[in-house]
Image (spheres, rainbow, N blue to C red):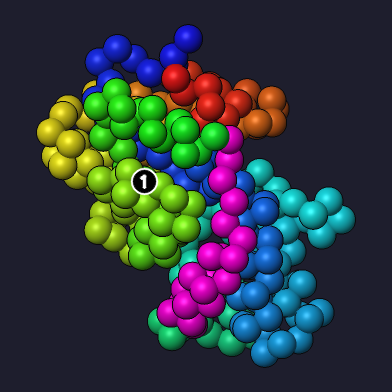
Amino acid sequence: MSVLPAKTKAVLFDKDGTLVDFDRTWAGTMMAGALHFADGDRAKAEMLCEAVGWDKARGTFAPDAFFANNPNAAIAERWAALLGRKSSAHDAGRLDAVFAKAILASVSPLGDLTGVVGRLRARGLKLGVATNDSRVSTEQQLMALGVGDCFQFVSGYDGPCAPKPNPEAVFEFARLARCKPDEIVVVGDSDNDMNLARAGGAYAVAVAADAEHRALLARRADATIASIDELE
């Protein structure tokens, strides 16, 4: 049974942890960025990774990882501070470039991404993405996954809308999809996503494979699912 309300006209997805497997996609990408930041020093790079939520022993990110919930500029600022220097716009730009290149080799879908997206489009629904990753990199990742042409709207931390949980992405997507905000379903795996939906007046669907994580998100969600395969 579909969790989408009957009046749904558009679906606004988070990317990481919702459409793509966060650990598989970002572990190697994060290390590539950390090594670049640490001038190739492996020990320092591992320290930087752990400081933003990487659990080396388990080989996964913590659910509340700083890396998962903040834009690249904030990660660059934290890493620079840990290395004893002041961050700059150049640092953030370098990190964007390294991440954007490395991630295309590791981006991995969650669930039946192609099938779910295709069936939602076949129902006449407009699809969008609101992410804390950069917009251009997100568009490249979606193309690499074979679904780039399925999304009418993509907003990253760098625009065109203000970063989550600011509701601007909901309002702009509603304008482009020619629908009301309450006819949009926001699907995501973080508090940022649930708060985005609440602030924008959209319907909130929390997605998390881990039952404990799903229960925490349920406090702010209208519905919960284990993966996007359960949307329909």
Say left or right for 42 vs 143.
Answer: right
> Residue tagged by mark 1?
129
Q: Residue at x 74, y 64 (%)?
A: 50
Looking at the image, residue 211 lies above or below residue 138: above
Question: Considering depth in this image, is 137 or 221 the residue closer to the camera?
Answer: 137
Majority secondary structure of magenta residues: helix
x and y percentages locating residue 70 in the rendered image: 50, 57
x and y percentages locating residue 208 in the rendered image: 60, 32
Looking at the image, residue 16 lies above or below residue 92: above
Question: Considering depth in this image, is 125 or 49 the residue closer to the camera?
Answer: 125
Q: Indicate yes or no whether the magenta region holds residue 107.
A: yes
Looking at the image, residue 24 lies above or below residue 158: above
> Crowdedness of circle 1 by 10 Å Cα count: few (<14), some, many (20+)?
many
Residue 136: name its quadrant: bottom left
Farthest-out residue, top = 1
Q: Residue at x 54, y 34 (%)?
A: 112
Say left or right for 86 vs 160.
Answer: right
Residue 143: name its quadrant: bottom left
The segment highlighted magenta reads 91-111
Residue 173: name its quadrant: top left
Amino acid type, residue under disc 1 in the picture: Val
Farthest-out residue, right = 57
Question: Considering depth in this image, is 18 or 213 the residue closer to the camera?
Answer: 18
Q: Secondary structure at mark 1?
A: strand
Q: Is residue 66 visible?
A: no
Q: Indicate yes or no whether the magenta region holds residue 2.
A: no
